[in-house]
Image (cartoon, rainbow, N blue to C red):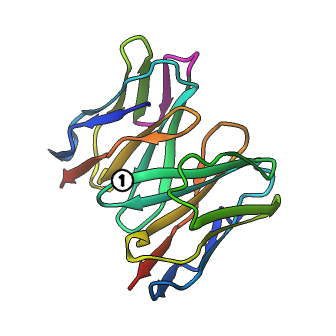
Amino acid sequence: KQEVTQIPAALSVPEGENLVLNCSFTDSAIYNLQWFRQDPGKGLTSLLLIQSSQREQTSGRLNASLDKSSGRSTLYIAASQPGDSATYLCAVGNDMRFGAGTRLTVKP
Amino acid sequence: DAGVIQSPRHEVTEMGQEVTLRCKPISGHDYLFWYRQTMMRGLELLIYFNNNVPIDDSGMPEDRFSAKMPNASFSTLKIQPSEPRDSAVYFCASSWGLREQYFGPGTRLTVT
């Protein structure tokens, strides 16, 4: 059974800092991996989807990488802003196993 | 498109009652997913459909839960009878192929 772990569970950084969120998974035979953000009391917003044949995806200040052999994905956020404050979740594979998320706070 | 639509947004019911949650996926999407989110267990996939056919319901917790998708634009998740431990936020999501999933705003269910 696929297990997904996200580290750290919470992160607080000053505005402008670059940061990395981590997602690890136990079964490397995955179809894809998706990163989401969730604002308090809201649904999830898709940020980036990486297919199993891809190594990374970029959207604006976000870059997600995938290393299937080591069972890891990272989400890089450049020049963080207070509006980036949210919980970030990764989901792995067809059956969408979610990690517990990283709660990010960006302080002005 | 209005995005994924879920109703009701909030539901409070008494233990033993039947609860029906509704979802309208994004038009043209062929996959529909039902999730449950709790503080204790995080976000869990309950069931997903492809072209209205259930593909994997291994996440459905027990027989009290059932889901249907009678057509491409409507799905229901039913709990009968409901129990306090069913209290959670239930999300519906849809996608075109196994690509980016778009989530609805969720239904917050409270069973007293």
- Label 1 secondary element: strand
Apparent side of residue B38 relative to residue A16 in the rendered image (left or right):
right
Q: Quadrant of residue A83?
A: bottom left
**Image position of A78 with respect to A56: above or below:** below
Q: Is residue B90 visible?
A: yes
Apparent side of residue B109 relative to residue A32 in the rendered image (left or right):
left
Q: Which residues are magenta?
A: A52-61
Query: In x, y percent, where is residue B62?
Result: 53, 59
**Secondary structure mostly seen in the magenta stretch:** loop
Query: In x, y percent, where is residue A89?
Result: 38, 44
Residue A56 inside the magenta-drawn segment:
yes
Q: Quadrant of residue A32?
A: top right
Of residues A80 and A31, the one nearer the viewer is: A31
Q: Amino acid at mark 1?
A: Gly
Residue B33 inside the magenta-drawn segment:
no
- Mark 1 highlights which residue? B42
Q: Is residue A77 visible?
A: no
Q: Residue at x 53, y 62 (%)?
A: B91
